[in-house]
Amino acid sequence: MTSDVFVSIVVCTRNRHEDLARCLKALSKIDYVRREILVIDNSTNPSTVALNAKSSAAISARYFYEPRRGLSVARNRGITETKGQLIAFTDDDCVPDNQWLKKALKNFNDLDVACCTGRTVSFMSDSLSATFEKYYGFDRGSTRQTFQQEGTKLNLGFLVKALPYARQRRITQVAPPPFSVGLGNNMIFKREVFNAVGYFDERLGAGTPTEAGDETDIFYRILKAGKKIVYEPEAIVFHKHRQTYAGLVKAVYVCGLGVSAFLRKHVNFGDIQAAVFYIGRLVNLMFAVNSYKRKREKEIAYLTFVELKGWIRGFLEYW
């Protein structure tokens, strides 16, 4: 796709002014001319709201206050306010590389590509960030991948590849799409895809009882609609990983909670494969907890158990 396409960059924020200011500073340096930046503010503190509006104005970003709570609500507000042919999303705790858009946009030369995700890595080198990456894992690696509808279907080949990971918590290497597609802090969509598959589900994501699962859900809907999603590792966003161990534990719990809730949604619509995915991961986590306990790897056994608790609860949260 040429540099003539107009891109809207949406940043949703809630009560994290310092993070937002850092993100906006990076976005202002993005090496791409035809773009706009939108800030959708879900903050509850009036002084934070004022600071966010000021930081937005400083880089000529379009600022909108959204009083309804929820990341999906804020993202949907962003979609309605954008002007671009492509709509890019990152989070307030991220620092996009200045080549982020240019590296991602080349993938839209394929007219069947509806979405492009990119690589998310830590911009800090402290030990807790390394622990976060080890156990939670934002980085999807350096290999470019194209995902299509057929890849979401379970088959014997997938089961053979997954078998060696049956007792491990981290199965990203073999997880089928949409679970391996990418993250919500680094994703770009064609505008028309939202007309085709709908907007973000406002019952999923941060600010709801499910707390996550929103991007996984929309990736799944896009793939089921027969469109392609590309993971472009050269489109890099740097992320501020959790800075406390309690934050890491919560992130692991939310991971189980949100993805499980996403699957429950599709089970409600009669998607048998979603039920198979849920049961398969449930058994996987149970085996993994016992495996790590036997090996006396207490920390990862605990974190796996935390994710398992989220996985069980998440299936009860979406009705």
Image (spheres, rainbow, N blue to C red):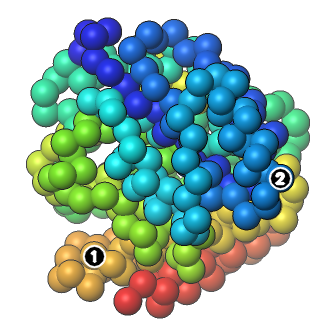
Residue drawn at x 21%, y 81% as measured from the top left = 269
**In the picture, residue 281 is in which quadrant?**
bottom left
Please state the horizontal and vertical placement of residue 6, each as a whole percent of the image: 32, 21
Task: Please give the residue where the numbered disc 1 appears in the rendered image.
Answer: 266
Q: Please name whichever residue, 115 or 72, is drawn nearer the observer in this view of the structure.
A: 72
**In front of the other: label 1 or label 2?**
2
Residue drawn at x 43%, y 75% as measured from the top left = 203
Residue 246 visible at all: yes
Q: Amino acid at mark 1?
A: His
Task: Specify whether 227 is left or right of 249.
Answer: left
**Relative to 49, is 62 above or below?**
above
Measured in 3D between alpha carbons, the distance from the residue under mark 1 to the one under mark 2, in whole angstroms, is 40 Å
Q: Please name whichever residue, 18 or 178, is drawn nearer the observer in this view of the structure.
A: 18
**Relative to 162, is 11 above or below?**
above
> Which quarter of the figure is the C terminus placed in?
bottom left
Q: Mark 1, residues whose alpha carbon is within 10 Å: few (<14), some, or many (≥20)?
A: some
Please state the horizontal and vertical placement of residue 54, each as a whole percent of the image: 73, 35
**Relative to 76, is 306 above or below?**
below
Under circle 2, the secondary element is helix
Residue drawn at x 82%, y 69% as measured from the top left = 298
Q: Amino acid at mark 2?
A: Ser
**Dot 1 or dot 2, earlier in sequence:** 2
Task: Please give the residue where the numbered disc 2 appears in the rendered image.
Answer: 47
> Which quarter of the figure is the N terminus placed in?
top left
**In the picture, residue 273 is in which quadrant?**
bottom left
Please state the horizontal and vertical placement of residue 99, each as a whole percent of the image: 51, 13
Q: Are marks 1 and 2 in contact (CB under 8 Å)?
A: no
Task: Specify whether 246 is left or right of 254.
Answer: right
Q: Mark 2, residues whose alpha carbon is within 10 Å: few (<14), some, or many (≥20)?
A: few
Residue drawn at x 13%, y 33% as measured from the top left = 112
